[in-house]
Image (cartoon, rainbow, N blue to C red):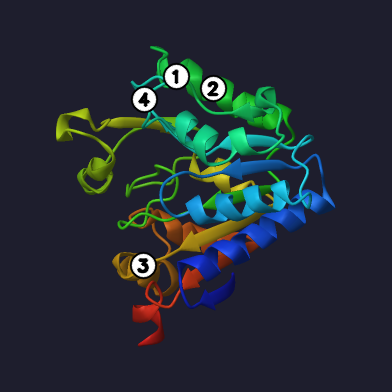
Amino acid sequence: MKTYIVKDYDEMSKKAASILAAQIVADPESVLGLATGSTPVGTYRYLRKWHEEGVLDFSGICTMNLDEYRGISKENSQSYYHFMVENLFSHVNIKRENTYIPDGTRKDSGAVCREYEDLIQRKGGIDLQLLGIGRNGHIGFNEPSDCFTEKSHCVSLARSTMEANKRFFEKAEDVPKEAYTMGIGTIMSAEKILLLVCGSDKAEAMYQTICGPITPEVPATVLRLHKNVIMIADEAAMSKVKSE
């Protein structure tokens, strides 16, 4: 795992955007695995800026999103589809038909997951997967468990994850209890993984990820087995690791 320790969120975002931009320039038909949440917002802001300046062309890029809430439509302001449109897709020249996110409204969760997994394979797999990390060490919505789930699946969200997501919803009862997510095996099959970590609230998760045993109880620890992971973390997130 190649690690960059940066001063703050903006430096993390710019560094991450430069790595994504390099991938796009090197292969204009890349398949990018994208993430949502507060962590990548700054990264997407830099990508938009560089597109507006004529540096980046998204016309041949294909994106596969990491996850989506189950039970809410893409029109919902808290859906990850809406997030991607607001933070990236509507600002760059990507073809909307080349952007893929699981459909949270379909009833047959098994079919959704099988079809999404098949789609990733038909696209030739993911060239670069962007990830954040949860406070409990989850990646995507792969929550702490007794095993690593290989393929895309529907997951019941941990209480800690639902608590962390409450700030995005008007009422606690509106927070989705389930989500679709790429499996650990799907994530690990990406050619390259870019992990972004920011804030002191992620310090314990980072300590366990880097220094603890590889275990599905801390899903991010599996990334240590991948051949090509780049991690960009700010000083606050690395505080417990650096103190060792």
Asked if labels 1 and 2 touch by Cβ distance under 8 angstroms, the answer is yes
Residue positioned 43% across, 50% down in the render = 139
Q: Position of residue 37 (x, y in %)?
A: 41, 46
| Label 3 vs label 2, nearer the camera | 3
Residue 232 seen anywhere in this rendered image of the structure: no
Pointer 3: what residue? 199
Tag 3: amino acid: Gly
Of callouts 2 and 4, the N-terminal one: 4
Q: Position of residue 171 (x, y in %)?
A: 16, 33
Side (left or right) of 78 relative to 160: right
Q: Is residue 139 left or right of residue 128?
A: left
Amino acid type assigned to the residue bearing label 4 in the image:
Arg
In front of the other: 150 or 181: 181
Q: Secondary structure at mark 2?
A: helix
> Residue shown at 51%/66% (left/top)?
10
Q: Residue furthest top?
A: 107
What residue type is disc 2 on? Arg
Rendered location of residue 176, percent (x, y): 27, 30
The CA span between labels 2 and 1 is: 6 Å
Q: Can you say whether 31 is above or below 195 in the image?
A: above
* Mark with earlier residue (4, 3): 4
- Disc 1 vs disc 4: Cβ atoms closer than 8 Å? no
Marks 3 and 1, the one that precedes in the sequence:
1
Tell which tag, 2 or 4, sits nearer the viewer.
Answer: 4
Looking at the rendered image, the disc whose residue lies closer to the viewer, 3 or 1, is: 3
Q: Quadrant of the N terminus?
A: bottom right
Query: Real-space Cα distance between discs 3 and 2?
Result: 35 Å
